[in-house]
Amino acid sequence: MPVSDHQPQVDNTFDGAGFGNFIQPFQIEDLGLLGRIIRLDTVLASAFERQNYPDEVAQLLAETMAMTASLSGIIKFDGIFTLQTQGDGPVNLLMADITSDGDMRGYARFHEAGVVEALGRAGSLVPKLLGAGHLALTVDQGPETERYQGIVELTGGSIADCAQAYFSQSEQLETAVIVVSEISADAGPRSAALMVQRMPGEAEETVARDMEDEAWHRAVVLMSSIKPEELLSDELSATQVLYRLYHEDGVRIYPQKQVRHTCRCSREKVGNTLASFPRAEIEEMADNGVVTVTCEFCKTDYRFGKEDMADLFESVADV
């Protein structure tokens, strides 16, 4: 749907009042660019509900989840896209994944005392809380396909900086990204991302070669003018944000993809995992004859008694 210089156009079914949970793709025709806006709120609230994250840890995970949703839109895939950071800081793991259907989950592993100590030091959240480590992007389309993975060192002071380093060091399209978050006891958590990229393989047709750099510079300058409170506002829709930034350049709005919080754990999956270990090792984990496994993402407990374990290992032996 093209947007004129005077009025943004979009399917209002998906872009009305409020904040929402979605990936909004768009194209800036006159500048030869593609992009997307991500907004998450109740997805974050559901992911954080049983975790008791300190605000700063929740902020990092909220931005990781927004970045995951944004990066997942770069390629077409049928499976699971995962963004993960691992470091030697008190938050030694941030992980978020999203399926091609829009089901998303996220988790942060942290050492509470270490977080408190780190927050007392000067500096940005990523080096203070994540420390030295790496960021990994993985696309898993099932056992019949080869898994793709890209890895880059943690660089900069924010999750956006780390992602930007990935694009700078890889052969991906030239990309600029902003990620913001807000953790509020009253309004709940929310995060947003805005990403623009040079259009693949079509720049010469869309913009004259000698104007490409100028067009890219203009897009990034306009993008950097957006305020965090605008990206996080319930009063400004994604279309209105884009209209404020790029109405002079011809913005084309594409259908939104809705995002939902869904954990993919199940009793069957947990049981299959347990049965893949030596039986004696699993039985040593039992407490009063019961083995309890807790999903780190949703904190659901799965309990397996003696009869359950016998059935599990019997089924493995029959295969």
Image: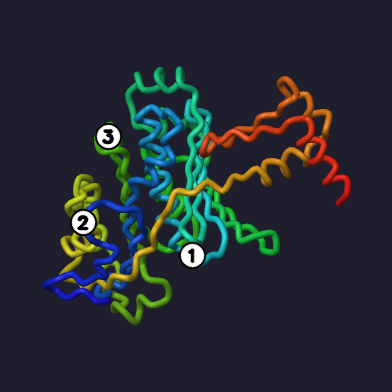
| Nearer to us: label 1 or label 2 | 2
Q: Which mark is residue 75?
A: 1
Question: Residue at the front extreme?
Answer: 307
Task: Specify the color scheme.
Answer: rainbow
Q: Which residue is mark 3?
A: 184
Residue 159 position by quadrant:
top left
Of mark 1 and mark 3, the one earlier in the sequence is 1
Q: Quadrant of the N terminus?
A: bottom left
Three-letter amino acid code of the residue under disc 1 = Ile
Helix, strand or loop at label 3? It is strand
| Nearer to us: label 2 or label 3 | 2
The percent coordinates of residue 196 (x first, y second) are 33, 61
Three-letter amino acid code of the residue under disc 3 = Ser
Q: Nearer the viewer, residue 186 or 174?
A: 186
Residue at image point 11% right, 72% down: 6
Helix, strand or loop at label 2? It is loop
Residue at image point 56% right, 48% down: 264
Residue 199 position by quadrant:
bottom left
Left or right side of 306 for 246 = left
Of mark 1 and mark 2, the one earlier in the sequence is 2
Residue at image point 32% right, 39% down: 189
The percent coordinates of residue 31 (x first, y second) are 26, 71
User: Between marks 1 and 2, how big is the CA–CA gap?
Assistant: 29 Å
Q: Nearer the viewer, residue 38 or 118?
A: 38
